[in-house]
Image (spheres, rainbow, N blue to C red):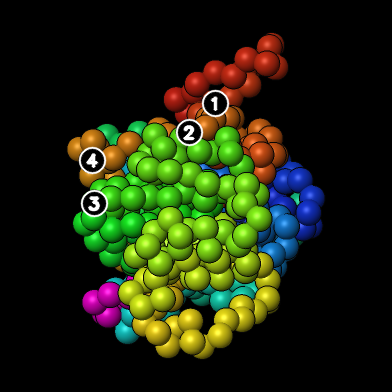
Amino acid sequence: MSTAGKVIKCKAAVLWDIKKPFSIEEVEVAPPKAHEVRIKIVATGICRSDDHVVQGTLPTPLPVIAGHEAAGIVESIGEGVTTVKPGDKVIPLFTPQCGKCRICKHPESNLCVKNDLQSPLQGTLQDGSRRFTCRGKPVYHFLGTSTFSQYTVVDEFSVAKIDAASPLEKVCLIGCGFTTGYGSAVKVAKVTQGSTCAVFGLGGVGLSVIMGCKVAGAARIIGVDINRDKFAKAKEMGATECISPQDYTKPIEEVIKEMSDGGVDFSFEVIGRLDTMVSALLCSHDSCGVSVIVGVPPGSEQLSVHPFELLTGRTWKGAIFGGYKSKDSVPKLVADFMNKKFSLDPLISNVLPFEKINEGFDLLRSGKRSVLSFFLCMHPYHPNIWERLDAVPVTVF
Ligand code: CND
Ligand code: ZN
Ligand code: ZN
């Protein structure tokens, strides 16, 4: 039976309050309106930005369905949609690409004006309304994607069609973590052959920065993290050395400057803390260094640096989604993945059934990035056994 044009009742993880666990609920997902697409999510990653929502450091209206790093299959389309059709494999785009605004036409920039990244977030689709309800209450969207739901509705410019053969449990990482990190190195910083780089924060995004630095030909890549368990993976991905600020009495920027003849060529803050943003800036060479902010900072806090730190010639910049124009770039990155130009396996610590979302967040907080799958379902008689399913049952109204 076709579900097109009907309300779908399905499973979603609703966040009713900050600092509380997600609650797995039955939600109603309205059909897509004109220029909208309803997607059956197959796999969704858990990124630290989702945890910023839970912690309240990325202020979002509540209740909300978070999640912004996913892959799925188009279930139905609204009127006027031309770039995807039912059955297409797709990746939702938390940074849209409308193709028409000043930024979409800008050759370098990527933050389309249709984005929902202002503070606080608006939490709706482009027309200002919502497609989710739970227990009779409307539920907010998150970054136009809301992937912690079996079905979601997005605007057409917030979804990209990808290769029909793509493994969705892997390429979902191209929806955020991989692309954000990799692009920060190759596209935003434009890391050069033979350069020295420092990467602060060795989570999924930081490891992807390292992959980008390596591909760009960096000669030295210094990984910085307070969790030493991250060092082995970082080295596997291309870090040439790894250090912990906790092993030194002097500031880490001084240590790195001594290691790199006065400062690195490129530095990256991939944690989301103000102190490490300043350390990353200061460890870059004061006349030729480029420092990129990738981490999402907490709430409304302000940074403070002496203007001289920039006056001498440093560049300080930041970017969302690795500077990539999303709708154009995501299909190409998926094609590169399919052509084995890079691997995503090292970025995934666990694949968990969707219902284990709270465990997935605990794992993230202990340093492990998980992918949640809607195709793993609990065995009816053995609660500890999870089976792969080809289709997930849903109720249609
Ligand atoms: P994750 O939490 O997995 O990694 C952060 C790493 O930083 C961990 O390994 C920590 O041990 C390490 N760390 C924490 N504190 C310190 C410290 N004081 N000094 C050194 N290391 C420390 O996070 P992630 O990789 O998922 O995300 C990293 C950041 O990127 C995070 O702030 C997230 O919100 C942000 C981000 C940005 C964008 C974008 O478009 N710019 C997109 N998604 C995520
Ligand atoms: Zn993210
Ligand atoms: Zn645009």
The residue at the point 58 percent across, 35 percent down is 229
Q: Position of residue 351 (x, y in %)?
A: 53, 30
Query: Nearest the camera: 377 or 95?
Result: 95
Tell me the CA gap for discs 2 and 4: 22 Å
Question: Which numbered mark, 1 or 4, is in the foreground of this view?
Answer: 4
The residue at the point 23 percent across, 40 percent down is 341
Say the numbered circle drawn on residue 232.
2
Q: Which residue is mark 3?
A: 217
Count residues near mark 3 (Cα–Cα under 10 Å), then give few for <14, some for 14-19, many for 20+.
Answer: some
Mark 2 near ligand 1 (CB under 8 Å)? no
Tell me the CA gap for discs 1 and 4: 28 Å
Q: Is residue 197 magenta?
A: no
Q: Amino acid at mark 3?
A: Gly
Q: Amino acid at mark 1?
A: Leu
Q: Amino acid at mark 4?
A: Lys
Is residue 203 found left or right of 188 in the rendered image?
Answer: right
Asked whether the beta carbons under mark 2 and mark 1 sit within 8 Å of each other, the answer is: no
Q: Position of residue 397 (x, y in %)?
A: 59, 45
Q: Is residue 105 magenta?
A: yes
The magenta segment = 104-112
Q: Of marks 3 and 1, which one's residue comes earlier in the chain?
A: 3
Say the numbered circle drawn on residue 376.
1
Quadrant of residue 189 within the rendered picture? bottom left
Which element type, helix, strand or loop, lies under badge 3?
A: loop
Tell me the CA gap for discs 3 and 2: 20 Å
